Amino acid sequence: MEPVVALVVAAGSGSRLGGDIPKALRELDGRPLVSHSLEGLAAGGVDRAVIVIAPGLDDDFAGVVAGSPIPARCVHGGAERQDSVLNGLAAIAADPDLAAARYVLVHDAARALVPADVVRRVIEALIGGAVAAIPVLPVVDTIREVTATGSATVDRSRLRAVQTPQGFSRDVLELAHQLVADQDLQVTDDAAAVEALGYPVVLVPGDREALKVTEPLDLLFAEAIVRSHA
Ligand code: CTP
Ligand code: MG
């Protein structure tokens, strides 16, 4: 079995959520969001984690690392999410314990309640030969595209909302993020980076519970989900 490493990106400030501590450390049911994420990843088959945090916050994340269900360490992120992923990938490549990993799953710490089954589906797709595998959901809202002259309905049956963890062959993800950095491209997720390199992306079913805590309302949803599991 190949070891599976998760890169948990947690270096954002959480400006849309607000509050005075980093979003990944905000508590949900008495534990930081990032700790919930680590539990979901571990339950779904991830063996090790690298948590990408904002520089200077190592002491704040020490308890998260100590309480992680799988071996975890922190590295420092960058200004944009894609910079944080690049730094995390460099840390994996430089770590003798992690560099043997063929697969890497990139996960938003803010998707705290990702179900183990979603993680499992991503890993299974990689083991089955996918170079990139990402969880998606049908779009429930009707979507309009704003155009120069007005707006038009988009056929939502063709659209999917994208979640994390996104799984990749580690070598391909490294090449993809190098390309993104070299060509100064802007990508909002890792699948887009791999796609820019020309690789196909396999879709697996996501789950509404893997919602990204972005705004205060999302934290209320997450609290309700935790209560429904009790
Ligand atoms: N992230 C990161 N490094 C950055 C920016 C974002 O590691 N420079 C991480 C966040 O910590 C988060 C994930 O990427 O877990 C998804 O980003 P988002 O939900 O946008 O989080 P923030 O950037 O922290 O929030 P906001 O955009 O509201 O400031
Ligand atoms: Mg952000």
Image: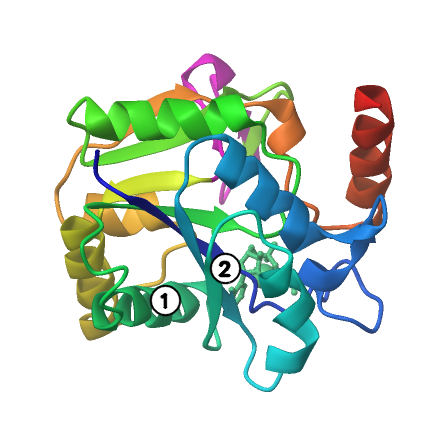
- Residue 154 is situated, as x and y percent measured from the top left of the image, at 49, 23
Ligand 2 - quadrant of the structure image? bottom right
Frontmost residue, 118 versus 97? 97
Provide the residue designation for mark 1. 88
The figure's colour scheme reads rainbow
In which quarter of the view is residue 220 placed? top right
In which quarter of the view is residue 143 placed? top right
For the residue with label 1, is its CB less than 8 Å from the closest atom of ligand 1?
no
Q: Residues within 10 Å of mark 2 (few under 14, many from 20)?
A: many
Tell me if residue 155 is in the magenta stretch: yes
Amino acid beneath label 1: Gly
Provide the residue designation for mark 2. 9
Q: Image height check: is 230 above or below 24? A: above
Looking at this view, name the residue that lies furthest to the top. 157
Q: In which quadrant of the rendered image does the C terminus lie? A: top right
- Residue that appears at 48% across and 55% down: 8
For mark 2, give the secondary structure.
strand
Amino acid beneath label 2: Val
**CB contact under 8 Å: marks 2 and 1:** yes
Q: Is residue 148 visible?
A: yes
